[in-house]
Amino acid sequence: MVNPNPKIAPSMLSSDFANLAAEADRMLRYGADWLHMDIMMIRHELSGCRTGSHFVPNLTIGAPVIESLRKHTDAYLHCHLMVTYPIDYVEPLGKAGASGFTFHVETAKENWQELIHRIKSKGMRPGVALKPETPIEELEAKDPVEMVLVMTVQPGFGGQKFMPDMMDKVRDLRKKYPSLDIEVDGGLGPSTVDLASSAGANCIVAGSSVFGASYPAQVISQLRKNVQDAQAGSKK
Ligand SMILES: O=C(CO)[C@@H](O)[C@H](O)COP(=O)(O)O
């Protein structure tokens, strides 16, 4: 049975980082369930470094920022790790006060069990992310997780165009794992959420559509209502 309470998570990547605590507070007042924190390390061929935890063509925040934000809020801080060695970040993020720790499936080939065990032991909820080109079969024969994040854009930047082709993945995941939290991330807003929610997504990450709106609270409640309506429809 899918969780009847949808999670709407504004992506703080679209917020004003210079006023992060106030931005977080604003989103929670507007009705956000989670705050989505994108932790990125730039890909090594772009940075010129040979080693390190690089995964995407961008660089954002890390544990010190999560720690600072945690001092201002009790919110569920859902961290999406776009780094090559997520295991290195479990301890610091756990200490900093992260609530959820979602890593990309290809970054945990050898140490899946160990990574999940460590995430849980630090009191965080583990999740796995799938890039657009990563098939759901990558999850087979692995210890189950409670949440899968389906990227609906290439990871790295906010403000990109939603990829509707990813909905087959969401549908297949929902069929296979009826009670899984399925999150979609990238290009979500009032005009695209219907595709995701009717495919079976129950957690929605939205950056530019929320932060760029004149009335973000309206967008958040619209996203929630859309997921609730889709859930109610699928029961009929
Ligand atoms: O992880 C990412 C991008 O890599 C996302 O969380 C984006 O930040 C979502 O932003 P919008 O597409 O909603 O503007």
Image (cartoon, rainbow, N blue to C red):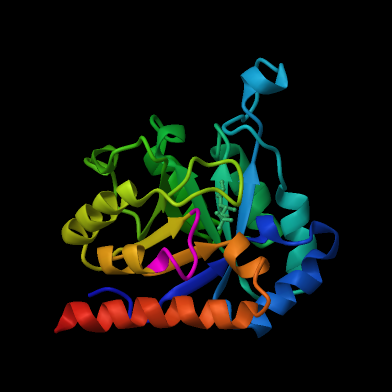
Q: Is residue 219 left or right of residue 199?
A: right
Q: Residue at x 23, y 57 (%)?
A: 171
> Which sits in the foreground, 204 or 95?
204
Q: Is residue 206 left or right of residue 182?
A: right
Extreme residue toward the right, this view: 18
Q: Residue at x 71, y 47 (%)?
A: 62
Q: Is residue 43 left or right of residue 189?
A: right
What segment is highlighted magenta in the picture?
186-193
State the image quarter where residue 60 is shown.
top right
Q: Residue at x 41, y 76 (%)?
A: 6
> Which sits in the foreground, 41 or 192?
192
Q: Is residue 32 magenta?
A: no
Using the image, determine if residue 24 lies above or below residue 78: below
**Residue 18 point in image, percent of width and height:** 85, 59
Using the image, determine if residue 169 lies above or below residue 177: above
**Residue 121 point in image, percent of width and height:** 51, 56
Q: Is residue 192 magenta?
A: yes
